[in-house]
Amino acid sequence: RTSPPPSLRPPLLPSSLPSAIPRQTCLGLPPGTPKSNLRTHLAAPITEQEETMSSNSGVYALCLARGGSKGIPKKNIALIAGKPLLCWCMDAAVESKVFDKVFVSTDCSEIAGVAKKHGYGVHDRDPATATDKASSESGITDFLKHHPDCKVLCLLQATSPLTEAADLAKAWEAFSKQNADSLVTVVRQHRFLWKVDKATGLAAPVNYKPEKRPRRQEWDGELIENGAFYFFTVESYNKTGSRLSGKIVAHEMSAETFTEIDEPCDLVICRELMEKRWGEAKVGAANSKRSECKIIAEIGINHNGDMALCKKLIMSAKVAGCQYAKLQKRNPDVCVPEAQKSKMRDTPWGRITYLEYKKKIEFDEKQIVELIEFGKSINIIVFASVWDKDSVDLMAKYTKISKIPSALITDIELCKYAREKFEFLIISTGMSTEEDIDTCYAACSPDVVMHTNSTYPCPSKELNLKYILHLKKKYPNAVIGYSGHEFGLGTTFAAVALGADWVERHVTWDRYMWGSDQMSSVEVPGLLKLVKGCTDVVDATMFPPGKRKIFKGELKKMESLRKKQKN
């Protein structure tokens, strides 16, 4: 069929509906969550109001992050438990509320981009201070030369991601109370130290007598510098050229913070530690009730360029209970490969070139605005997947949410550009390797990561739904979703049961209409079943793992069916 059936007559909608869905709700955070807490999720740039982070004027935090690491290339932005490595210590600095300002000093544009997206100040590091042979002190000196207002500096190590805000706050308190010139972080180790005489090759103990070997409980151990961070006054540094000088105090940290990332094996160990720590920290959140699954009705190009049909699909999505209706937006002149532009195709508009066909099914700016406004009038958010920068610019004028389709998550330039323009960004992972996904995630910090298989339609055996569990563990800062292209609804319900908090399915008026995506789409009756099914699954899995609960209905049955035991 080349034309849509008669129009849908939807039931009357309530008149008192909220005008927008809050960003907190989009992220799956509790209502009322302070907007300042959304930066980790949205990677929003720091605002003028947030620039002064504490009353400690002139107290700065600095992370030196060069791009030329040999052991682990670009290790400073390697993903650890879902966040770029340097973000762990930098976020701890922000959360500690000790510092007036926080900075990343780097010679690498990619690292600088990550820092800016997470709201940190960026210092353009002199390349001469970022070589393999350059000392950290040369990087400190370079920074201080350009920041004369700095009175006290805290040097943070990106390779020590186990640093916590509480450590920085306690260390600052000790540093201030003692009126110290510098502070070093240490861990307590119960290790027996030895030295070997190079001339004789003989070994001798350093910190104990073998004939009186102490038991652990009888010995305080040794305090060993772990390099997590250092406080020092700029005055003392300028006198000595050293981060540690004058009156020095020590802040003792937990033993596990001795772990530092210098070799690939350290990265593996630290990932395990961080994922364990992060998991423990999230117990409270995990033990809260699951409340809702966000559902996107993916209209895509199934409207075939027909505004009336598109509006009917948007209305159908609203009536079914979806929160979002999504289109696709592209500039055909940019997106269609040159070799494909002049190829002839049979279409509902006759035999025309592929480029002409793509333009026929593309809505212009005026039509996009009309569809977005139509969505607002019935309280459903209409947005689009963006396929090029022109489309990013157009859609960003009218909506704060967008999606990078699976086909384009390897276009890192586009991903970064979209992140700058939209407050809320979704990606799909079809057609991508693990490395592709990691690179995209590090570049644009998406708010939602959707597992998908881009086969249309996808066989059930290739859906690999348990990958959702892997994504939830790997990217704890993101919401994990599922974008399905399979026949039927059962596997989508399974995805929700496995923890997908966002679901996207293609929707069509009639699966036998003309178009490449129609057959793997859900018709309107199926969309109603999809929303109800996902809601039922959320209700059925709302409680976290734990001891068995007895509900009111069972109590009644217990009274009527279970024999009362005699005393």
Image (cartoon, grey):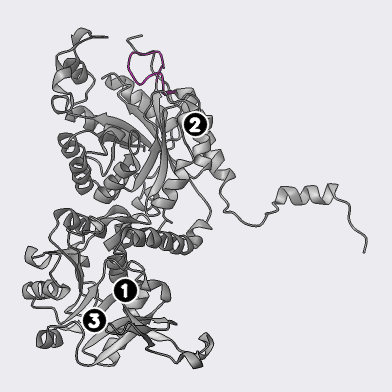
Instruction: Assess whether residue 513 is covered by the magenta stretch.
Output: yes
Magenta span? 509-522
Query: Where's the C terminus, which quadrant?
Result: bottom right
**Percent of width and height locating residue 119:** 22, 61
Q: Is residue 98 left or right of residue 124?
A: right
Vertical placement of 473 versus 297: above or below?
A: below
Instruction: Tell me what residue is drawn at x 29 percent, y 42 percent.
Output: 436
Q: Amino acid at mark 1?
A: Ser
* Magenta segment, prevailing SS (helix, strand or loop): loop
Mark nearer the viewer, 3 or 1: 3
- For label 2, the residue is 530
- For label 3, the residue is 231
Alpha carbon separation for disc pair 2 and 3: 56 Å
Q: Along the line of sight, which residue is nearer the eye, 364 or 329?
A: 329
**Percent of width and height locating residue 149:** 10, 78
Vertical placement of 374 versus 551: above or below?
A: above
Alpha carbon separation for disc pair 3 and 1: 14 Å
Q: Earlier in the sequence, mark 2 or mark 1?
A: 1
Q: Earlier in the sequence, mark 2 or mark 3?
A: 3
Q: Along the line of sight, which residue is nearer the eye, 118 or 304?
A: 118
- For label 1, the residue is 96
